[in-house]
Amino acid sequence: MMFADVLTLLVNSLTWAMATFLVAAGLTLIFGTLHILNFSHGGFFMIGAYAAYSLTQALGGSESMAMYLFGALAGGAVVAVLGLAVDRLVLRRLGGVDDAYVLIATYALLLVCEGSTKLIWGLNYRSVMPPSVLDGAWVAGHAVIPKMSLFIIACGIAVFVAMEYFLNRTSSGRLVKAIAVDAWMARLLGVNVRLVYTATVAIGFALAGLAGGLLLANQTLSPSLASGFVIQAFGVIIIGGMGSVSGAFLGSILLGLIDAVGQWVLPSLPGLPFFIAMTLILLLRPQGLMGRRH
Protein backbone atom coordinates (compact mmCIF):
# COMPACT_ATOMS: atom_id res chain seq x y z
CA MET A 1 0.00 0.00 0.00
CA MET A 2 1.43 3.39 -1.01
CA PHE A 3 1.69 6.40 1.29
CA ALA A 4 -1.17 8.11 -0.55
CA ASP A 5 -3.40 5.09 0.07
CA VAL A 6 -2.51 5.00 3.77
CA LEU A 7 -3.18 8.74 4.15
CA THR A 8 -6.50 8.48 2.32
CA LEU A 9 -7.49 5.51 4.46
CA LEU A 10 -6.59 7.39 7.65
CA VAL A 11 -8.51 10.53 6.65
CA ASN A 12 -11.57 8.51 5.64
CA SER A 13 -11.56 6.54 8.89
CA LEU A 14 -11.16 9.67 11.04
CA THR A 15 -13.90 11.48 9.10
CA TRP A 16 -16.31 8.59 9.72
CA ALA A 17 -15.19 8.37 13.34
CA MET A 18 -15.59 12.06 14.17
CA ALA A 19 -18.92 12.35 12.33
CA THR A 20 -20.20 9.39 14.35
CA PHE A 21 -18.78 10.78 17.60
CA LEU A 22 -20.50 14.12 17.01
CA VAL A 23 -23.82 12.26 16.90
CA ALA A 24 -22.92 9.96 19.81
CA ALA A 25 -21.66 12.69 22.17
CA GLY A 26 -25.06 13.89 23.40
CA LEU A 27 -26.41 10.33 23.52
CA THR A 28 -23.51 9.30 25.76
CA LEU A 29 -23.90 12.29 28.06
CA ILE A 30 -27.62 11.67 28.65
CA PHE A 31 -27.21 7.96 29.24
CA GLY A 32 -24.24 8.48 31.56
CA THR A 33 -26.23 10.90 33.74
CA LEU A 34 -29.88 9.85 33.53
CA HIS A 35 -29.25 6.18 32.58
CA ILE A 36 -31.86 6.54 29.84
CA LEU A 37 -31.02 5.18 26.40
CA ASN A 38 -32.63 7.77 24.16
CA PHE A 39 -33.62 5.98 20.96
CA SER A 40 -35.03 9.25 19.55
CA HIS A 41 -31.60 10.91 19.52
CA GLY A 42 -31.23 10.41 15.78
CA GLY A 43 -34.54 12.16 15.19
CA PHE A 44 -33.37 15.30 16.98
CA PHE A 45 -30.06 15.13 15.12
CA MET A 46 -32.14 15.20 11.93
CA ILE A 47 -34.25 18.13 13.14
CA GLY A 48 -31.08 20.05 13.97
CA ALA A 49 -29.84 19.47 10.42
CA TYR A 50 -33.14 20.61 8.88
CA ALA A 51 -33.30 23.66 11.17
CA ALA A 52 -29.76 24.66 10.18
CA TYR A 53 -30.66 24.14 6.53
CA SER A 54 -33.78 26.33 6.76
CA LEU A 55 -31.94 29.12 8.56
CA THR A 56 -28.97 29.22 6.20
CA GLN A 57 -31.27 29.18 3.15
CA ALA A 58 -33.43 31.95 4.60
CA LEU A 59 -30.34 34.10 5.23
CA GLY A 60 -28.86 33.66 1.78
CA GLY A 61 -27.12 30.28 1.74
CA SER A 62 -24.16 28.62 3.40
CA GLU A 63 -21.29 29.95 1.28
CA SER A 64 -20.03 31.96 4.24
CA MET A 65 -18.23 29.98 6.94
CA ALA A 66 -19.67 32.27 9.60
CA MET A 67 -23.19 31.64 8.31
CA TYR A 68 -22.60 27.89 8.20
CA LEU A 69 -21.41 27.84 11.82
CA PHE A 70 -24.23 30.15 12.88
CA GLY A 71 -26.74 27.75 11.32
CA ALA A 72 -25.19 24.82 13.19
CA LEU A 73 -25.33 26.68 16.51
CA ALA A 74 -28.92 27.74 15.84
CA GLY A 75 -29.82 24.12 15.06
CA GLY A 76 -28.32 23.15 18.40
CA ALA A 77 -30.31 25.85 20.19
CA VAL A 78 -33.58 24.77 18.55
CA VAL A 79 -33.05 21.15 19.53
CA ALA A 80 -32.03 22.17 23.07
CA VAL A 81 -35.41 23.88 23.50
CA LEU A 82 -37.15 20.80 22.14
CA GLY A 83 -35.09 18.75 24.59
CA LEU A 84 -36.44 20.76 27.51
CA ALA A 85 -39.98 20.00 26.34
CA VAL A 86 -39.15 16.30 25.92
CA ASP A 87 -37.62 16.23 29.39
CA ARG A 88 -40.73 17.83 30.88
CA LEU A 89 -43.26 15.67 29.04
CA VAL A 90 -41.48 12.33 28.60
CA LEU A 91 -38.11 11.73 30.23
CA ARG A 92 -39.19 12.70 33.76
CA ARG A 93 -41.86 10.03 33.59
CA LEU A 94 -39.34 7.34 32.64
CA GLY A 95 -37.30 7.42 35.84
CA GLY A 96 -37.31 3.98 37.45
CA VAL A 97 -39.35 2.50 34.58
CA ASP A 98 -38.38 -0.83 33.03
CA ASP A 99 -35.88 -0.45 30.18
CA ALA A 100 -38.30 -1.99 27.69
CA TYR A 101 -40.80 0.82 28.25
CA VAL A 102 -38.01 3.41 27.94
CA LEU A 103 -37.08 2.03 24.52
CA ILE A 104 -40.73 2.00 23.43
CA ALA A 105 -41.28 5.59 24.59
CA THR A 106 -38.12 6.98 22.98
CA TYR A 107 -38.76 5.02 19.76
CA ALA A 108 -42.22 6.60 19.66
CA LEU A 109 -40.47 9.98 19.95
CA LEU A 110 -38.32 9.03 16.97
CA LEU A 111 -41.47 8.34 14.94
CA VAL A 112 -42.87 11.72 16.00
CA CYS A 113 -39.64 13.39 14.83
CA GLU A 114 -39.79 11.65 11.45
CA GLY A 115 -43.47 12.47 11.00
CA SER A 116 -42.96 16.11 11.97
CA THR A 117 -40.05 16.39 9.54
CA LYS A 118 -42.22 15.08 6.70
CA LEU A 119 -45.00 17.53 7.56
CA ILE A 120 -42.74 20.58 7.81
CA TRP A 121 -40.09 19.94 5.15
CA GLY A 122 -41.74 17.36 2.92
CA LEU A 123 -40.35 14.18 1.38
CA ASN A 124 -37.94 15.75 -1.12
CA TYR A 125 -34.21 15.24 -0.73
CA ARG A 126 -32.23 18.38 0.05
CA SER A 127 -28.54 19.16 0.06
CA VAL A 128 -26.26 22.05 0.92
CA MET A 129 -22.93 22.99 -0.57
CA PRO A 130 -20.13 23.49 1.96
CA PRO A 131 -18.84 27.00 2.62
CA SER A 132 -16.46 28.21 -0.05
CA VAL A 133 -13.51 27.90 2.34
CA LEU A 134 -14.31 24.18 2.80
CA ASP A 135 -15.02 23.46 -0.86
CA GLY A 136 -12.41 21.53 -2.77
CA ALA A 137 -9.48 19.50 -1.48
CA TRP A 138 -5.82 19.60 -0.58
CA VAL A 139 -3.42 17.45 -2.54
CA ALA A 140 -0.61 15.70 -0.66
CA GLY A 141 1.42 13.77 -3.20
CA HIS A 142 -1.06 11.42 -4.84
CA ALA A 143 -3.55 11.73 -1.97
CA VAL A 144 -6.58 14.00 -2.31
CA ILE A 145 -7.90 15.18 1.06
CA PRO A 146 -11.30 16.96 1.06
CA LYS A 147 -11.32 20.10 3.17
CA MET A 148 -14.76 19.15 4.50
CA SER A 149 -13.28 15.95 5.92
CA LEU A 150 -10.64 17.89 7.83
CA PHE A 151 -13.35 20.23 9.14
CA ILE A 152 -15.39 17.29 10.46
CA ILE A 153 -12.31 15.78 12.11
CA ALA A 154 -11.50 19.12 13.76
CA CYS A 155 -15.11 19.52 14.98
CA GLY A 156 -15.16 16.04 16.50
CA ILE A 157 -11.89 16.61 18.35
CA ALA A 158 -13.05 20.05 19.54
CA VAL A 159 -16.32 18.65 20.94
CA PHE A 160 -14.46 15.82 22.69
CA VAL A 161 -11.94 18.20 24.28
CA ALA A 162 -14.74 20.56 25.37
CA MET A 163 -16.76 17.74 26.94
CA GLU A 164 -13.74 16.27 28.72
CA TYR A 165 -12.81 19.70 30.07
CA PHE A 166 -16.36 20.37 31.23
CA LEU A 167 -16.80 16.99 32.94
CA ASN A 168 -13.37 16.78 34.56
CA ARG A 169 -12.17 20.36 35.05
CA THR A 170 -15.26 22.33 36.08
CA SER A 171 -17.32 22.16 39.25
CA SER A 172 -20.54 21.79 37.23
CA GLY A 173 -19.09 18.87 35.30
CA ARG A 174 -17.89 17.14 38.46
CA LEU A 175 -21.37 17.60 39.90
CA VAL A 176 -22.88 15.90 36.84
CA LYS A 177 -20.48 12.96 37.27
CA ALA A 178 -21.22 12.73 41.00
CA ILE A 179 -24.98 12.63 40.38
CA ALA A 180 -24.49 9.98 37.71
CA VAL A 181 -22.77 7.80 40.32
CA ASP A 182 -25.12 8.42 43.27
CA ALA A 183 -28.07 10.77 42.79
CA TRP A 184 -29.56 9.82 46.18
CA MET A 185 -26.46 10.94 48.09
CA ALA A 186 -26.34 14.16 46.06
CA ARG A 187 -29.91 14.93 47.14
CA LEU A 188 -28.96 14.38 50.77
CA LEU A 189 -26.17 16.91 50.35
CA GLY A 190 -28.67 19.51 49.11
CA VAL A 191 -27.96 19.31 45.39
CA ASN A 192 -30.86 20.16 43.07
CA VAL A 193 -30.63 16.91 41.13
CA ARG A 194 -33.70 17.68 38.99
CA LEU A 195 -32.09 20.92 37.77
CA VAL A 196 -28.87 19.11 36.88
CA TYR A 197 -30.83 16.45 35.00
CA THR A 198 -32.69 19.12 33.03
CA ALA A 199 -29.48 20.98 32.17
CA THR A 200 -27.84 17.71 31.08
CA VAL A 201 -30.77 16.88 28.81
CA ALA A 202 -30.61 20.35 27.26
CA ILE A 203 -26.86 19.99 26.62
CA GLY A 204 -27.27 16.47 25.24
CA PHE A 205 -30.03 17.51 22.84
CA ALA A 206 -28.08 20.64 21.87
CA LEU A 207 -25.13 18.43 20.92
CA ALA A 208 -27.46 16.37 18.70
CA GLY A 209 -28.71 19.50 16.92
CA LEU A 210 -25.19 20.93 16.66
CA ALA A 211 -24.00 17.68 15.06
CA GLY A 212 -26.82 17.91 12.52
CA GLY A 213 -25.79 21.44 11.60
CA LEU A 214 -22.05 20.75 11.44
CA LEU A 215 -22.56 17.68 9.23
CA LEU A 216 -25.12 19.47 7.03
CA ALA A 217 -22.90 19.65 3.93
CA ASN A 218 -21.67 16.08 4.44
CA GLN A 219 -25.03 14.40 3.92
CA THR A 220 -28.28 14.50 1.98
CA LEU A 221 -31.28 15.61 4.02
CA SER A 222 -34.26 13.27 4.02
CA PRO A 223 -36.79 12.05 6.61
CA SER A 224 -34.83 8.77 6.80
CA LEU A 225 -31.64 10.55 7.91
CA ALA A 226 -32.27 9.72 11.58
CA SER A 227 -31.69 5.98 11.31
CA GLY A 228 -28.38 6.03 9.44
CA PHE A 229 -26.11 7.85 11.87
CA VAL A 230 -27.82 6.74 15.06
CA ILE A 231 -27.11 3.04 14.43
CA GLN A 232 -23.42 3.87 14.13
CA ALA A 233 -23.66 6.10 17.21
CA PHE A 234 -25.20 3.32 19.27
CA GLY A 235 -22.42 1.05 18.06
CA VAL A 236 -19.60 3.31 19.26
CA ILE A 237 -21.13 4.04 22.67
CA ILE A 238 -21.71 0.33 23.28
CA ILE A 239 -18.16 -0.51 22.22
CA GLY A 240 -16.66 2.41 24.14
CA GLY A 241 -18.63 1.74 27.33
CA MET A 242 -22.10 3.03 28.05
CA GLY A 243 -21.95 6.58 29.40
CA SER A 244 -18.21 7.08 28.81
CA VAL A 245 -17.37 10.09 26.63
CA SER A 246 -13.73 9.05 26.24
CA GLY A 247 -14.89 5.50 25.49
CA ALA A 248 -17.22 6.74 22.74
CA PHE A 249 -14.37 8.80 21.27
CA LEU A 250 -11.97 5.86 21.32
CA GLY A 251 -14.64 3.48 20.05
CA SER A 252 -15.48 5.74 17.13
CA ILE A 253 -11.83 5.94 16.06
CA LEU A 254 -11.35 2.17 16.36
CA LEU A 255 -14.54 1.29 14.47
CA GLY A 256 -13.86 4.01 11.90
CA LEU A 257 -10.45 2.53 11.16
CA ILE A 258 -11.89 -1.00 10.96
CA ASP A 259 -14.69 0.18 8.66
CA ALA A 260 -12.27 2.02 6.36
CA VAL A 261 -9.91 -0.97 6.15
CA GLY A 262 -12.91 -3.22 5.56
CA GLN A 263 -14.08 -1.10 2.62
CA TRP A 264 -10.60 -1.33 1.12
CA VAL A 265 -10.20 -5.09 1.68
CA LEU A 266 -13.85 -6.18 1.22
CA PRO A 267 -15.47 -3.54 -1.02
CA SER A 268 -18.27 -5.94 -1.97
CA LEU A 269 -19.33 -6.42 1.70
CA PRO A 270 -19.74 -2.90 3.14
CA GLY A 271 -20.42 -2.76 6.87
CA LEU A 272 -19.51 -6.40 7.54
CA PRO A 273 -16.15 -5.69 9.26
CA PHE A 274 -17.90 -3.08 11.44
CA PHE A 275 -20.40 -5.59 12.83
CA ILE A 276 -17.80 -8.36 13.16
CA ALA A 277 -15.57 -6.02 15.16
CA MET A 278 -18.48 -5.02 17.40
CA THR A 279 -19.30 -8.66 18.06
CA LEU A 280 -15.71 -9.62 18.89
CA ILE A 281 -15.14 -6.65 21.20
CA LEU A 282 -18.36 -7.31 23.09
CA LEU A 283 -17.49 -10.99 23.46
CA LEU A 284 -14.03 -10.17 24.82
CA ARG A 285 -15.03 -7.11 26.86
CA PRO A 286 -18.82 -6.93 27.38
CA GLN A 287 -18.65 -3.70 29.40
CA GLY A 288 -16.94 -1.86 26.53
CA LEU A 289 -13.44 -0.47 26.14
CA MET A 290 -13.76 2.13 28.91
CA GLY A 291 -16.69 0.68 30.84
CA ARG A 292 -16.61 -0.87 34.28
CA ARG A 293 -17.78 -4.31 35.27
CA HIS A 294 -20.82 -4.31 37.53
Image: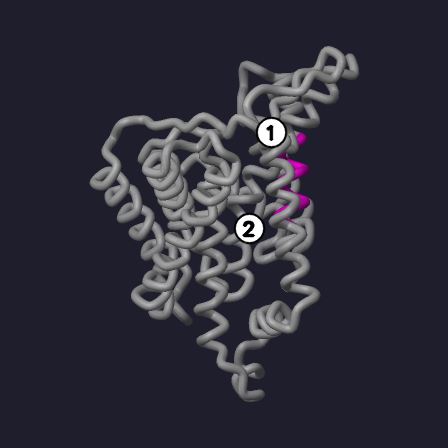
Mark 2 to mark 1: distance in Å?
19 Å
Q: Which of 170 and 275 is in front in this view?
A: 170
- Residue 74 in the image, given as x and y percentages of width and height: 42, 49
Residue 25 is marked as 2
Q: In this view, does 129 lie above or below 72?
A: above
Which quarter shows the N terminus? top right
What element does badge 1 sit on? Answer: helix
Name the residue at 40% across, 70% down: 95
Name the residue at 46% across, 39% down: 67
Asked which quadrant contains residue 12, the reply is: top right
Magenta part of the protein: which range?
Answer: 247-257
From where the camera sits, is residue 287 visible? no
**Label 2 is placed on what type of residue?**
Ala
Q: In this view, does 225 lie above or below 190?
A: above
Residue 268 is marked as none
Residue 149 is marked as 1
Q: Which of 264 and 134 is in front in this view?
A: 134
Q: Nearer the viewer's eye, disc 2 or disc 1?
A: 1
Dot 2 or dot 1: first in sequence order is 2
**Label 1 is placed on what type of residue?**
Ser
Name the residue at 61% across, 17% down: 266
- Residue 68 in the image, given as x and y percentages of width and height: 47, 38
Q: Which of 264 and 210 is in front in this view?
A: 210
Magenta run includes residue 121: no
Q: In this view, does 193 lie to the left or right of 81?
A: right
